[in-house]
Image: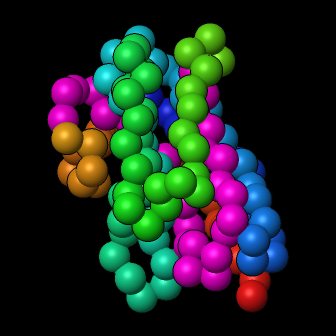
Amino acid sequence: QVQLVESGGGLVQAGGSLRLSCAASGRTFSMYAMGWFRQAPGKEREFVSAITWSGGNTYYADSVKGRFTITRDNAKNTVYLKMNSLKPEDTAVYSCASALHIRALRADFDYDYWGQGTQVTVAS
């Protein structure tokens, strides 16, 4: 199994920045990729970004492309999501997830393990 713990959420003004972290433990050697999803109140969970663990290929939702950057630190088994130019519509609970197998990575069913989530609130 893989355990995931997110951190770094909080309250920020529009236009500001935050960096989320997701630390993985357990069978991390079996991970193919890690991703970030978000869910705003009353809305479905949506894909934000993903990165493959070995090759470092990255994927972004159109809504965050150019503003968010996903990176990984293999030595620390940690993935980061740097969020710049934040907008009120970015407000959501952000969750990281790990995928053990080669998949498209843009749907929540592509992932096997999930963290608890961290709240990001962007004030206008």
User: Residue 41, image x and y in percent?
Assistant: 49, 84
Q: Quadrant of residue 108?
A: bottom left
Does any portion of residue 5 appear in the rendered image? no
Q: Is residue 59 magenta?
A: no
Highlighted range, magenta:
77-103
Q: How has the structure been colored for display?
A: rainbow
- Picture layout, residue 81 above or below residue 72: below
Q: Is residue 91 above or below residue 65?
A: below
Could you tell me if residue 12 is visible in this image?
yes
Q: Residue furthest front?
A: 66
Q: Which residue is pictured at 59% across the width and 57% down the height?
A: 67
Percent across and percent down for residue 91 are: 60, 76
Quadrant holding the C terminus? bottom right
- Residue at 42% x, 88% y is 42
Label count reads: 0
Between 113 and 20, the one nearer to me in the picture: 20
Residue 71 is situated, as x and y percent measured from the top left of the image, at 57, 32
Residue 25, picture quadrant = top right
Frontmost residue, 89 versus 45: 89
Residue 115: image x %, image y %? 50, 47
Q: Is residue 53 left or right of residue 110?
A: right
**Residue for point 38% across, 82% down:** 43
Q: Is residue 88 magenta?
A: yes
Q: What residue is drawn where x is 18% and y is 35%?
A: 103
Specify whether 20 is left or right of 13: left
Give whichever of 35, 113 is nearer the camera. 35
* 91 lies above or below 48: below
Quadrant location of the N terminus in the rendered image: top left
